[in-house]
């Protein structure tokens, strides 16, 4: 589902909180299992937004968000425990200077010089944690395609335990558990299905 509530410049304002909540609720009602929230807020969002995200999580939805692009502390919505906060690295695994840091960072994904579809369907190259988060969301979707009964907590566990560790050994404030690894995550879920630990399709 492509749910849009930003203006033509990709911005939203404090009077748009209700639109965001309605978009989250719509996604949940219509069967979304993963929400990619590649947006951030410069102000503390109202509790009603967090409640909407919490309801989504309780309904079995994995919410993937961004850490932000100011090179400082993890911002909203990634600061909330309901959101899997994703940072950005370049193609060599180096943490992008703009990628925010903090204990909330769960994982990192490719976020530097990423080719995507721009206005008019034309390709464009850009950087940001908003490009890293969809990589994590996409891998989570792959795992659900193999084992649809995975819970958000189980999805996150597989994503983190199979991630490629970067920087200092173990979880750190810049890369979290490491770089999301689609092949390793898929193989881990397949192995769990073969052992009877998970249900497959």
Image (tube, grey):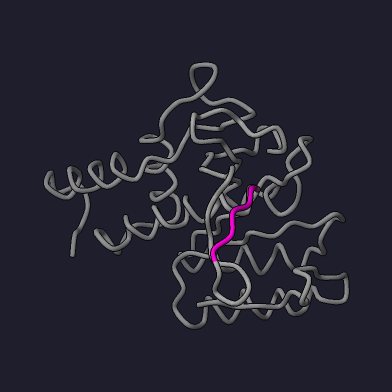
Q: Magenta region: which residues?
A: 123-127
44 to 188, vertically: above or below: below
7 to 43, vertically: above or below: below
Image coords of residue 49 (percent x, y): 73, 67
Image coords of residue 160 (percent x, y): 43, 38
Residue visible at 54% across and 39% down in the picture: 108
143 to 109, vertically: above or below: below
Residue visible at 57% across and 45% down in the picture: 111
| Image label count | 0
Name the chief secondary structure element in magenta: strand
Residue visible at 50% across and 77% down in the picture: 1
Residue visible at 52% across and 76% down in the picture: 28
In the displayed structure image, the side of residue 60 where residue 70 appears, left or right: right
Tell me the quarter of the image containing the C terminus: bottom left
Image coords of residue 194 (percent x, y): 11, 47
Front-most of residues 8 and 188: 8
In the displayed structure image, the side of residue 85 where residue 47 appears, left or right: right
Image coords of residue 17 (percent x, y): 79, 73
Look at the image and say whether residue 68 sits in the magenta stretch.
Answer: no
User: Which residue is the extreme one toward the front?
Assistant: 122
């Amino acid at each position: 589902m492509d749910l849009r509530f930003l203006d033509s410049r990709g911005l939203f304002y404090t009077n748009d909180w209700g639109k965001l909540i309605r978009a989250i609720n719509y996604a949940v009602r219509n069967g979304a299992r993963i929400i990619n929230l590649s947006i951030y807020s410069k102000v503390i969002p109202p509790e009603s937004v967090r409640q909407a995200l919490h309801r989504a999580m309780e309904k079995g939805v994995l919410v993937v968000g961004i850490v932000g692009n100011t090179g400082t502390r993890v911002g909203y919505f990634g600061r909330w425990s309901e959101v899997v906060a994703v940072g950005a690295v370049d193609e060599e695994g180096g943490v992008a200077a703009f990628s925010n840091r903090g204990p909330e960072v769960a994982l990192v994904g490719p976020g530097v010089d990423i080719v995507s579809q721009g206005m008019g369907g034309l390709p464009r190259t850009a950087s940001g944690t908003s490009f890293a988060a969809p990589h994590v969301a996409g891998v989570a979707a792959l795992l659900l395609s193999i084992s649809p009964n995975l819970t958000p907590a189980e999805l996150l566990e597989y994503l983190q335990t199979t991630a490629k560790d970067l920087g200092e050994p173990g979880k750190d404030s810049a890369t979290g558990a490491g770089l999301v690894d689609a092949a390793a995550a898929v193989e881990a879920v397949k192995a769990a299905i073969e052992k009877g630990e998970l249900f497959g399709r």
